[in-house]
Amino acid sequence: MKQYRAHLLICAGTGCVSCGSFKVKEALEEEVRKRGLENEVLVIATGCNGFCERGPILLVQPEGVFYQQLKVEDVPFLVEEHLLKGRPVTKFMYIPPEEKNPIPKMKDIGFFKHQRLIVLRNRGRIDPEKIEEYIGFDGYEAMAKVLAEMTPEEVISEIIASGLRGRGGAGFPTGRKWEACRRQKATPKYLVCNGDEGDPGAFMDRSVLEADPHAILEGMVIGAKAIGAEKGFIYIRNEYPLALHRVEIAIRQARDYGLLGENILGTGFDFDAEIVQGAGAFVSGEETALIASIEGRRAFPRQRPPYPAERGLWGKPTNINNVETWANIPRIIHRGSDWFAGTGTEKSKGTKIFSLVGKINNTGLVEVPMGTTIRDIVFGIGGGIPKGKKFKAIQTGGPSGGCIPADMMDLPIDYDTLARAGSIMGSGGMIVMDEDTCMVDVARYFLRFTQDESCGKCVPCRVGTRQMEEILTRITEGEGEPEDIGRLEGLAATVHMGSLCGLGHTAPNPVLTTLRHFRNEYEAHIFAKRCPAHVCKKLIAFVIEPETCVGCLLCKKNCPVGAIRGEIKKTHVIDQELCVKCGACFEVCPSRIRAVARVSARDVEKR
Amino acid sequence: MEEKRKLRIQDLAKIRDEARSLATIREGPGRAKVTVHMGTCGIAAGAREIMNALLDEMKEKEVRDVVVTTSGCAGLCNQEPMATIELKGQPPVKYFDLTPEKIRKIFVKHVLGGQPATEYALAVGSETLY
């Protein structure tokens, strides 16, 4: 590697790649060559920066100038202006919603400046496909320290002292888990990295695997030394081709350098890791189902105890941790447990990565200290709700979690506060909902997901979730009965109690939390046959306000079923019999006119 | 891929130091910034050679924590090629009518030595840049 005066760090996470960042990278390289700058300027592909909403993203160092939504055709101008003439190009910079002035530097952008990076420290900074770059930023140093200087007991007590808890969602103290596995006499012992990330809208693990694969390998070698394991499996979903690719490269490079395999770094310690590709069943993320899947069987959970620490893969002691947990390990050893425990709340230490999606301006991946409030995440980092809508609730923990209403937004997020609010930390999915979201519909969406993904082993989960989904569907269609709320609560308790694994155990959470915080919406659907957010199709109607309609024919042309009658410059009318409530008319009616309204179906009948 | 030599613990530090020094640039501004003015006038007057000489000098002296950047025309086209050197916490100094030899001397004296090379300097102070 040579010395360059500028590094162009182009984001090559899945989000940016799907927006064309590889093409932009090629264009940058070509343009740099064309301008004769190839000895001065280096182009590097990095892991995900998290600001996926704005991809493809380019960071120009050393100035720290941040460019976003770059297209191939922007590249020649950008290279000429910024790199040749030294004039940063404002038109490719980020402008916060509803503001006028661009923010030139990454560190000044709200999305980035409120974050604290421990796990994602290398994101957007190193090329994840080059082991030398990982080593350049202190990579494998913690591993060397552990192998050369520390006893297994010292490693475990360091992890216990750090207060690290499992980032897969349940929050079990990692050091204790390791200790339990270490105490087992049977050999060999195995390690598993659980990358079976399945929550809708969640992509924390994918991003870590893509941006910093060596951190996971390093964490696993440290764990192996502490536990006495000799083999590790990294379970990654098939839907994550880029993550698979980068971890494969990382394993190969680490083996070539003697950082994996026999006699690591000449210390006499042996450990190797391999990838297992998952077929993408949600239940595989449950640890006993994951074990079955790695062994080549159908991903069926089994009863615990015995826990995997006792009887895991092929009946041998096995320690399973989530991707994000593994990635924390090298940092804790490198910087010390006191440093790590200095961040976070009393019982939840360190940071947590969240994937922020839904009705939010800055969709993306964020890492914040434990104890950050929902308000700081949604408004400080997320930039608030688009189109000036009101913030209504946030779903944490995916389908196993629950929703937290806007009036609780000053809640500091950690494992315990979320549990008290009826939700869970989960792996870190955060779905933001605005005033146009129907909470019954949301509960139904998640129930349908868990019902689809239920493996079918336990009757309460298999049949119970189906019954619950049917009741919820009935409610959203205006066929709800007064007894339905009680039925849902009863079924929820049965499913919760009668299921073996976490999937069934937590499946009722979305229903229970929406019932707790938004009971009035259920009641409106059941008793008044109204959907307050105007979402549930059977309960709403689209009408054209005769006073405001100018008769422009736009809605008539766009109606897919020909339900709109009317001539130019005359008020249009929607035939409610024909209308399929697709909302096309609502979308196309010009915003300065807004003649199409969404109303309760009952109000139309009265008209 | 050819078989690589397996690393020992002491090799790790070597790789780290080399990779790190070349990547310090990614961690933001260093202790000094050298701006080579590269407007059309600068390029025509030979700013490219100034840049090459500068990068070469840095490579020879193994200097990694100095930022080298470009900027547009400074408005003094007849004084090109020009460069501005800014040490952390000190006012920028503009150098004019440069040659590759001059910039090498200036680099050693000002950036490495901390003393502005007044014999080649045009002025102290600068317009605001990013």
Image (cartoon, rainbow, N blue to C red):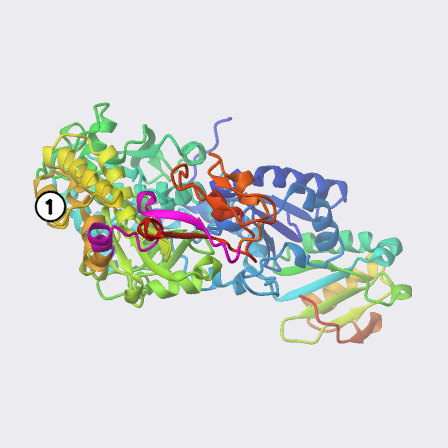
Instruction: Report x, y in % for residue A175.
Output: 20, 51
Left or right of A272 in this view: A381: right
Instruction: Report x, y in % for residue A593.
Output: 55, 56
Q: Residues within 10 Å of mark 1 (few under 14, many from 20)?
A: some
Is residue A295 something one can see in this rendering?
yes
- In the image shown, does A117 or A162 lie closer to the viewer? A117
Going by the numbered disc 1, the residue's amino acid type is: Arg
- In the image shown, does A75 or A525 lie closer to the viewer? A525
- In the image shown, does A253 or A404 lie closer to the viewer? A404
Identify the residue at the far top of this view. Answer: A296
What range of the chain is rendered magenta?
A: A521-548
**Which of the 4 image quadrants contains residue B24?**
bottom right
Q: What element does badge 1 sit on? A: helix
**Which of the 4 image quadrants contains residue A117?**
bottom left
**Which of the 4 image quadrants contains residue A285?**
top left
Residue pictured at 64% horizontal, 49% vertical: A3
Left or right of A507 in this view: A533: right
Left or right of A351 in this view: A552: right
Q: Is residue B123 above or below residue A408?
A: below
Tally of numbered tags: 1
Q: Is residue A591 magenta?
A: no
- In the image shown, does A381 or A322 lie closer to the viewer? A381
According to the picture, the residue beneath numbered tag 1 turns out to be A487
**Which chain does the numbered disc 1 sit on?**
A
Q: Is residue A539 magenta?
A: yes
Instruction: Report x, y in % for residue B90.
Output: 67, 76
Is residue B16 something one can see in this rendering?
no
Instruction: Report x, y in % for residue A20.
Output: 57, 39
Q: Is residue A274 above or below residue A474?
A: above
